[in-house]
Image: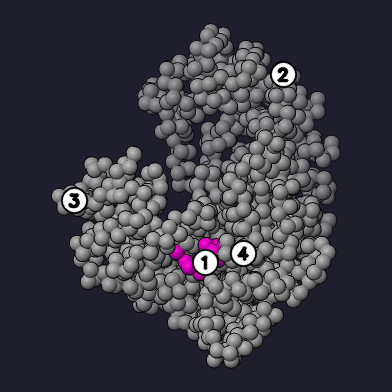
């Protein structure tokens, strides 16, 4: 009952939205006047209420945040309280703090819902910002008990106080079907737009001829791709499918191709337009479950030239992966998940070349004047003449154009002519809709205007571009801003820059200020565009109250994006105004977000005067802003295949810029990484571009710098002679040796004899600084393992005998990644390193192999249909690393406070009593971190030996001692014990680990470290001091290669802390994953196990 009363109250209060200008009227409306009118309005709806309310003015409670209350004496009772904030209240400088204070005070009064009515003047920028700030805070916080009535709603409601009450209209707002459906899709603001095609879905939708086939495909196969040319109604058809399934009890999800949603959060956070990552695909996974239907809009991209050229194996969205998830989650016991995808014809034809299996699920919409009236529905024209007549009738009722209201005989003849001309000329639902929408205010006597409107509806992009050109500059800039950045929290397209710290309104106002325009004029222009173009601009996320400042805004159809693009191309004066201000802006506010996002205009520079482009580019270079130049590097790198030679020249200037030199430089690294993705470029062009990035300045390390060497080494016989000379030239530079080492080893078999000899000499060299090249050699050998000849494998044996223990430690740790592929000789070599060599291998090797096996088991369990058998096989495996990993998985999957099924419990018991060395290590770790296991398996902890392998797990345990304080002292005693044994290196490793993590550990560990610094042996003191230096260096985000062996020692002991830099790896299946740089090999081989076609780094 409470929920229904709440709906009734909302329906009475939400009577629509007034224009922002109308809110100026609140200057003359007093606080008490509004309250009295509102109370009368509520009393006048007595015929609506299921339970008649009692209204009470509570003047004595004003100081507690309540003006009056409405009490519904139902069972249980429902109480709503109201707080009205007048024009004067919003003019108060302390408005926000006072309002939140009153909200806090209102908590002393028992109520179900607090309605806050804001009577502010939205034409006043100060009021606008205050209202917007308050609304944003409420929406972002956890305040479901607060309902805000915005100034536009409040004025529309005030204007209704003296109007007759229309109870039927209010009851109409109480209908649950479409309105609740749109709320599910975060499109509730559509309900306030009387011309919204979404809100009028039931009245407007006319299915295409292929609809039965689409519906049947979705029903029987669970997945359908709706393909067609622009404006054929693909999206509208998909939404209608969602609505049909919603009425059957399905949970609908509409995901734009540009965004995915973090699990448990409805905020768009990441780009899925191109270069999708594992997290992108699997974040959609939560929508693919029984009784859910997912609509994925245009996942392959739009039909722009750039999108068509970018459709290739490496960046095509893998819809087939969603199908795999669908198959694994379909059963006969529950309603199966459903997936709907839309795609433009041109893009889908390209996608089919790479995912041909999609063809069997594709239904093509077809455009034409008329089609076959018999035969297969799939072959018919989607909207024949008769169906377009239906559409025209529906749009006539929706828009009620002036020219259709004439009733004379002469007028009827003209009407029939115009209607016949429109239906015969306009073959798609969208073009018909545009005609009726744009002709709303045209009278019938302006027949030539109606005919022109029909012609313009055929090419709406051209017509709308002309319409924008007639608007004031401030309003033109609103469309430009929406077009360039779309106000998303992620990049919309590769050449557009990202920023996420400003709201859409703030970004627009910043641009107005940049152009020296009047801020108040810009403020009104923003509102004019947002309010006057609801059929073109769609407010989605965070705009449930239809504020002119949504967190997500877009054009309703790509045709409007094309229109703004045409407008910019046809009106260079607008770009000139922006360009002219960029140099001054960069001088006054270097690093501004606005300037970085203006780089998005690069797509228009390519059609402009080269001299103009050079001038703007020079202004960016002269800004000396590393962040700005890094953004520019991304833009130019991606733009290379599509632009003229002047851009390639600019690239050379960019990477040779003084700020693009030095170690880990983000400008050149970003450029090289991005440019390397352009695998479709001719080889000579790729070599030229990539190697340009190495010509100037020194490059110490960085994943991006490996890529030019990878390219040349992998294709040594194909690349230009110039590229080969580049490689040899760089090998003569000492700082390039370690960077090139990985590529030399990875593609050893591709190299000529002289470079193979160079690589072998590098492996046998042992100097103070040899560890870093050795580390890269090992990385390359591991990456290329499986295709090497005996000469390359010989390098592994050479490195295992290195006099540098850090080299041996890293080799043993890396060999873990190919543990299952090692032959008998190399397996013996690894066991020698792991158990006999005095190095941190026991920590590095054993710990990493258990982690790797654990990840593999978890992934396999997600997709394995015979889970009990798989679990049994892992738990009884002859490989003790797999058994240790299985124990970890079984214990982690246990429900909190509950036992698992008997099979799992049996296996847990077996594994905890397993005496294999590695399984004992895992058991020790779990017994110490999960105290409930100690009572479940009494005595087992005492029976375990703190051997070397156990400490591989114990090193991770340190960070858990806050949750298990009772073992803290025991652990510190064990560390002391180890120091007095032969496990000197393990002692050093644990001391280092404790010291680096000290800020996260309990106070007893802090005390222990202090005691060690004061009374410990010199070596322990040196380790602690070095770890502190490492920790401080990390916080400054600088590379860490100091000439102190304790720092390098950490590379072998714990590969998490040494380098805070983040990098990305890519597979040819289109996945992207971010990983810490030192742990990159873990990822490579994990991905290779899951995806054999892993693209070589």
Measure how far apart labels 2 and 1 are at the Cα level.
Answer: 62 Å
For marks 2 and 1 on the same chain, the one whose residue lies earlier in the sequence: 1
Residue 953, image quadrant = top right
Q: Position of residue 1036 (x, y in %)?
A: 45, 47
For marks 1 and 3 on the same chain, the one whose residue lies earlier in the sequence: 3
For marks 3 and 4 on the same chain, the one whose residue lies earlier in the sequence: 3
Q: Is residue 375 left or right of residue 637?
A: right
Q: Is residue 952 visible?
A: no
Numbered mark located on residue 876 in the image: 2
Is 248 drawn above or below residue 387 in the view shown?
above
Measure how far apart labels 3 and 4 are at the Cα level.
Answer: 49 Å
For marks 2 and 3 on the same chain, the one whose residue lies earlier in the sequence: 3
State which region is magenta: 192-201
Residue at 57% of width from left, 62% of height from top? 201
Question: Toward the viewer: 938 or 1052?
Answer: 938
Secondary structure, magenta segment, majority class: loop
Numbered mark located on residue 715 in the image: none
- Camera-near label (2 vs 1) is 1
Numbered mark located on residue 205 in the image: 4
The residue where tag 1 is placed is 196
Q: Say if mark 2 contacts mark 4, CB within 8 Å.
A: no
Look at the image and tell me in which quarter the N terminus lies: top left
The residue where tag 3 is placed is 58
Q: Say if mark 3 contacts mark 4, CB within 8 Å.
A: no
Question: Toward the viewer: 780 or 679?
Answer: 679
Residue at 72% of width from left, 39% of height from top? 1090
Residue at 59% of width from left, 86% of height from top? 412
Measure how far apart labels 2 and 4 are at the Cα level.
Answer: 59 Å
Crowd tier of the residue under label 3, counting other residues whose Cα lies within 10 Å: few below 14, some 14–19, many 20 or above: some
Q: Position of residue 389 (x, y in %)?
A: 66, 74
């Amino acid at each position: 009952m409470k929920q229904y009363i709440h709906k009734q109250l909302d329906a009475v209060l939400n009577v629509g939205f007034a224009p922002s200008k109308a809110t100026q009227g609140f200057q003359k409306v007093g606080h008490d006047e509004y309250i009295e009118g509102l109370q009368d309005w509520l009393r006048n709806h007595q015929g609506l209420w299921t339970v008649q309310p009692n209204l009470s003015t509570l003047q004595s409670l004003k100081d507690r945040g309540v003006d009056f209350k409405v009490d519904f004496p139902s069972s249980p009772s429902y109480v709503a309280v109201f707080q009205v904030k007048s024009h004067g209240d919003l003019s108060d400088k302390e408005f926000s703090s006072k309002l939140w204070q009153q909200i806090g005070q209102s908590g002393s009064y028992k109520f179900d819902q607090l309605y806050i009515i804001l009577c502010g003047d939205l034409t006043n920028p100060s009021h606008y910002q205050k209202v917007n700030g308050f609304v944003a805070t409420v929406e972002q916080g956890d305040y479901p008990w607060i309902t805000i009535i915005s100034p536009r709603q409040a004025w529309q409601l005030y204007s209704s106080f003296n109007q007759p009450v229309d109870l039927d209209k209010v009851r109409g707002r109480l209908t649950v079907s479409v309105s609740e459906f749109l709320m599910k899709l975060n499109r509730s603001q559509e309900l306030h737009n009387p011309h919204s095609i979404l809100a009028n879905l039931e009245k407007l939708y006319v299915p295409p001829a292929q609809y039965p086939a689409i519906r049947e495909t979705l029903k029987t196969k669970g997945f359908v791709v709706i393909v067609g040319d622009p404006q054929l109604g693909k999206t509208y058809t998909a939404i209608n499918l969602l609505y049909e399934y919603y009425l059957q009890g399905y949970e609908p999800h509409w995901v734009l191709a540009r965004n995915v949603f973090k699990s448990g959060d409805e905020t768009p956070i990441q780009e899925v337009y191109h270069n999708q990552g594992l997290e992108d695909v699997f974040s959609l996974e939560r929508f693919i479950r029984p009784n859910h239907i997912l609509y994925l809009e245009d996942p392959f991209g739009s039909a722009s030239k750039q999108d068509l050229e970018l459709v290739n194996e490496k960046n095509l969205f893998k819809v087939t992966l969603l199908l795999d998830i669908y198959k694994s989650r379909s059963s006969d016991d529950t309603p199966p998940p459903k997936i709907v995808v839309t795609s433009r014809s041109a893009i889908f034809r390209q996608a089919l070349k790479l995912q041909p299996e999609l063809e069997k699920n594709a239904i093509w919409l077809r455009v034409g004047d008329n089609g076959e009236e018999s035969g297969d529905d799939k072959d018919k024209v989607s909207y024949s003449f008769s169906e377009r007549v239906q559409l025209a009738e529906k749009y006539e009722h929706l828009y009620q154009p002036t020219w259709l209201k004439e009733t004379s005989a002469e007028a009827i003849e003209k009407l029939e002519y115009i209607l016949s001309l429109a239906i015969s000329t306009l073959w798609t639902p969208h073009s018909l809709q545009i005609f009726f929408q744009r002709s709303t205010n045209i009278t019938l006597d302006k027949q030539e205007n109606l005919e022109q409107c029909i012609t313009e509806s055929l090419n709406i992009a051209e017509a709308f571009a002309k319409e924008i050109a007639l608007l004031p500059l401030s309003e033109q800039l609103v469309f430009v801003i929406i077009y360039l950045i779309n106000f998303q929290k992620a990049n919309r397209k590769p050449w557009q820059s990202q920023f996420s710290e400003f709201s859409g309104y703030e970004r627009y106002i910043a641009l107005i200020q940049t152009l020296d325009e009047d801020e108040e004029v810009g403020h009104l222009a923003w509102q004019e565009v947002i309010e006057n173009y609801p059929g073109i601009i769609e407010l989605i996320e965070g705009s449930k109250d239809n504020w002119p400042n949504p967190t997500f805004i877009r054009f309703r159809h790509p045709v409007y994006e094309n229109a703004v693009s045409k407008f910019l191309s046809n009106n260079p004066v607008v770009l000139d105004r922006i360009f002219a201000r960029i140099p001054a802006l960069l001088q006054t506010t270097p690093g501004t977000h606005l300037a970085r996002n203006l780089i998005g205009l690069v797509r228009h520079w390519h059609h402009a005067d080269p001299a103009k482009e050079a001038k703007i580019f020079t202004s960016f270079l002269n800004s000396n802003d590393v962040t700005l130049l890094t953004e520019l590097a991304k833009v130019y790198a991606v733009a290379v295949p599509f632009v003229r030679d002047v851009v390639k020249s600019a690239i050379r200037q960019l990477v040779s810029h003084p700020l693009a030199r030095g170690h880990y430089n983000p400008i050149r690294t970003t450029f090289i990484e991005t440019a390397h993705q352009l695998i479709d470029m001719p080889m000579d062009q790729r070599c030229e571009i990539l190697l340009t990035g190495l010509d100037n300045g020194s490059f110490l390390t960085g994943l991006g710098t490996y890529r030019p060497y990878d390219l040349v080494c992998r294709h040594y016989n194909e690349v230009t002679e110039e590229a080969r000379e580049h490689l040899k030239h760089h090998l003569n530079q000492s700082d390039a040796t370690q960077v090139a080492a990985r590529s030399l080893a990875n593609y050893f078999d591709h190299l000529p004899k002289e470079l193979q000899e160079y690589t072998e000499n590098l492996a046998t060299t042992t100097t103070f600084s040899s560890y870093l090249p050795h580390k890269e050699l090992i990385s390359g050998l591991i990456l290329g393992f499986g295709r090497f000849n005996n000469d390359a494998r010989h390098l592994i044996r050479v490195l295992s005998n290195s006099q540098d223990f850090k080299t041996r430690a890293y080799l043993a740790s890396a060999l873990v990644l190919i543990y299952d592929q090692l032959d008998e000789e190399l397996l013996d070599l690894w066991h020698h390193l792991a158990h006999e060599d005095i190095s941190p291998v026991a920590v590095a090797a054993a710990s990493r192999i258990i982690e790797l096996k654990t990840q593999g088991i978890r992934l396999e369990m997600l997709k394995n249909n015979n889970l009990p058998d798989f679990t049994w096989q892992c738990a009884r495996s002859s490989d003790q690393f797999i058994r240790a990993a299985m124990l970890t998985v079984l214990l982690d999957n246990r429900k909190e406070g509950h036992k698992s099924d008997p099979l799992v419990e049996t296996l847990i018991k077996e594994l905890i009593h397993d005496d294999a060395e590695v399984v004992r290590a895992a058991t020790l770790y779990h017994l110490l971190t999960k105290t409930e296991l100690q009572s479940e398996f009494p005595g087992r902890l005492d029976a375990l030996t703190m051997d070397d392998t156990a400490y591989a797990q114990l090193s991770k345990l340190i960070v858990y001692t806050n949750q298990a304080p009772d073992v803290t002292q025991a652990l510190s005693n064990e560390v002391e014990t180890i120091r007095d044994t032969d496990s000197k290196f393990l002692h050093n490793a644990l001391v280092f680990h404790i010291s680096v993590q000290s800020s996260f550990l309990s106070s007893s560990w802090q005390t222990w470290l202090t005691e060690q610094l004061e009374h410990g042996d010199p070596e322990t003191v040196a380790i602690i001091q070095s770890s502190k230096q490492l920790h401080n260096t990390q916080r400054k985000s600088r590379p860490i290669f100091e000439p102190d062996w304790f720092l390098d020692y950490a590379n072998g002991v714990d590969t998490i802390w040494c380098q805070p830099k983040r990098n990305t790896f890519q597979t040819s299946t289109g996945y992207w994953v971010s990983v810490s740089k030192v742990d990159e090999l873990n990822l490579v081989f994990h991905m290779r196990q899951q995806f054999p076609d892993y693209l070589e780094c």
